[in-house]
């Protein structure tokens, strides 16, 4: 009889302990697509703004000459190599990745349309997060895919056109992971 009473008391204590444990556990707050996107954008905005890398090909070189961003400085005897000087107008919007003010245009042959140079916009910006997928559970955290896009707002139309030329990539799909920290969702990583 004494064992039966002890067993009932232990059972009651065990039930009470489980009940208190469950009462102390709070469910995680929801993480909406809007909130997840805001966390990602906040991460981008907290980093220093940077210029956009621009790969300038044959069409971009022509557009830059037309816009007055650079002028021809001289051609080489082979007829298809040339040097261009970045003008004061061009220096306000672009700079060579290698520094300096002379573009050394050196295609492999007269019909080579694949030769490119890399420049960077003077205007700095942050990437833009958009088009997020549904936020899904991943273990104790959450995850979502979204599009990271270059922000061309504020660029002169000709420069924005050069940036849009191939082989420049204006956006890419990224993957974000979120973790619950002190009862609030935080961005834990971007891949």
Image (tube, helix red, strand yellow):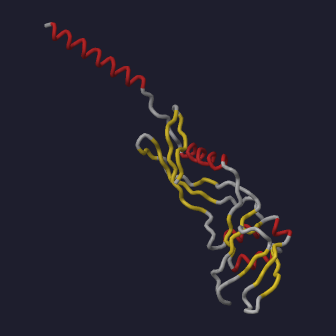
Q: Position of residue 175 (x, y in %)?
A: 51, 53
Q: Is residue 132 above or below residue 25?
A: below
- Identify the residue at horizontal 38%, vertical 20% (top origin): 20
Residue 181 appears left or right of 128? left
Quarter of the rendering containing residue 68: bottom right
Q: Residue furthest right?
A: 88
Front residue (pair 178, 32): 178
Q: Is residue 49 above or below residue 57?
A: above
- Identify the residue at horizontal 65%, vertical 60% (top origin): 150
Quarter of the rendering containing residue 59: bottom right
Front residue (pair 90, 66): 90
Q: Is residue 18 above or below residue 112?
A: above
Q: Position of residue 43 (x, y in %)?
A: 62, 47
Q: Residue furthest left?
A: 1
Front residue (pair 150, 96): 96
- Identify the residue at horizontal 66%, vertical 73% (top origin): 165
Q: Position of residue 138 (x, y in %)?
A: 42, 45
């Amino acid at each position: 009889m004494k064992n039966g009473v002890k067993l009932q008391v232990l059972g009651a204590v065990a039930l009470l302990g489980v009940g208190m444990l469950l009462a102390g556990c709070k469910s995680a707050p929801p993480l909406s697509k809007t909130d997840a996107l805001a966390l990602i954008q906040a991460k981008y905005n907290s980093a220093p703004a940077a210029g956009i890398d621009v790969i300038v090909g044959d069409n971009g070189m022509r557009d830059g000459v037309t816009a007055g961003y650079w002028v021809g400085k001289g051609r080489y005897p082979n007829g298809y190599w040339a040097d261009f000087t970045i003008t004061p107008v061009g220096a306000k919007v672009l700079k060579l990745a290698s520094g300096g003010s002379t573009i050394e245009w050196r295609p492999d042959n007269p019909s080579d349309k694949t030769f490119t140079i890399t420049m960077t916009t003077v205007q700095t910006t942050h990437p833009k997060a958009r088009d997020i997928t549904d936020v899904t559970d991943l273990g104790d955290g959450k995850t979502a895919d979204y599009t990271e896009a270059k922000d061309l707002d504020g660029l002169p139309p000709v420069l924005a056109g050069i940036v849009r030329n191939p082989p420049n990539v204006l956006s890419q799909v990224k993957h974000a992971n979120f973790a619950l920290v002190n009862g609030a969702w935080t961005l834990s990583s971007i891949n």
